[in-house]
Image (cartoon, rainbow, N blue to C red):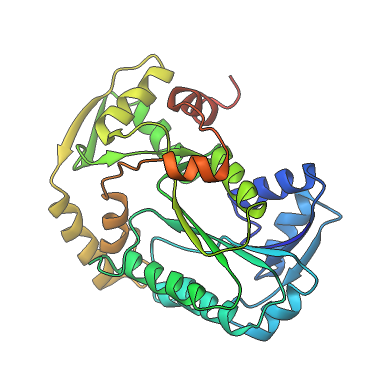
Amino acid sequence: MQIAITGANGHLGLKLIDRLQEAGDAVRALVRSERAVESVRGRFPQLDVRIVDYADSEGLRNASEGCDALIHLVGIIKESKANTFEQAHEAPCRALTEASLAVKHVIYLGIVGTHSGSTNACLQSRARAEALLRKSDVPVSILRVPMVLGPDDYASMSLARNGQKSLVFGFRTASLEQPIYSGDVVSAIFAATRLDAVNRTLDLAGPESLSRAQLIKRAGQCFDNEPGVVSVPVSLGYAMAFLFELVSSSPPVTRAMLGVLDHDDNIDNGPALRELGIELTPLDETLQAVLLPNA
């Protein structure tokens, strides 16, 4: 197959290129800057990499010409004045819808909890983006995932730091997490490229749903440590985020971001696993792989 990937320079995008090339597929990486080109070419010197504005329908049509499928990996959970949810989610999906793409199938990576009735700005934006893609003439497979854990990514590094502390303070640590291994997300996306091109939405998470406090303690076991966990009211976090939003054009944390991270994840993986035909990596194996990658 010939497959185009937007956001190909991210952690998942680079892993996905590896997986697709191993299967004999030709990959075309669609990125937004020369810096992103250098990032992809540093790992794949001979890859077809093209710069495109994701909000430019004609540019997307031309950049994906000759491809069988397009994988759309672009999205954020924290917006700023320079990069809003509308710019990151809806504008690219609107452009894809208006592009009259020649591809037969679009695979879109979304977030568990996305719903048009959500009160969270990020999840509302994601829902509008999904709705735009469903209106397209090209069938879309929407794959929603929660926290993704992979080597050297932000979530894993944060979890590693907490796992090595003697005492961890966290917002509403009773909230449920169901983290999924990045390799399993790549397997799921790869499997989706082999499915019949029809509209579908699949929610997929890790094999265990557990509280944030329990996850931190499980991470601690990787370091032979038993961190104490103190839960802080999430309302305090929202108040801090509100202040950051008032004084900064690019706040370190926002209320919408906290809302996404605070979402309770308890997903039934059965339907997605049956359709995709994949298996999940056990949580303890995932933690060992991402927290102690050189062990």
Assign the N terminus to one quadrant of the image.
Answer: bottom right
Q: Residue furthest right?
A: 46
* Image location of residue 200, percent across then percent down: 49, 60
Q: Which residue sits at x=41%, y=39%?
A: 179
Q: Residue at x 51, y 29 (%)?
A: 281
Q: Position of residue 22 (x, y in %)?
A: 78, 42
**Residue at screen point 30% across, 44% down:** 265
- Residue 84: tell me if it is visible: no
Q: Residue, x 14% and y 53% (percent of image)?
A: 236
Relative vertical location of residue 1 with respect to residue 19 in this rendering, above or below: below
Q: Is residue 76 left or right of residue 262?
A: right
Quarter holding residue 68: bottom right
Is residue 111 toward the left or the right of residue 176 in the image?
A: right
Residue 169 location, x and y as percent? 22, 36
Residue 29, percent from left and from top? 72, 62
Q: Is residue 117 visible?
A: yes
Q: Is residue 293 above or below residue 67?
A: above
Snapshot quadrant of residue 213? top left
From the image, which quarter does the C terminus lie in? top right
* Camera-nearest residue between 65 and 219: 65
Q: Nearer the viewer, residue 73 or 78?
A: 73
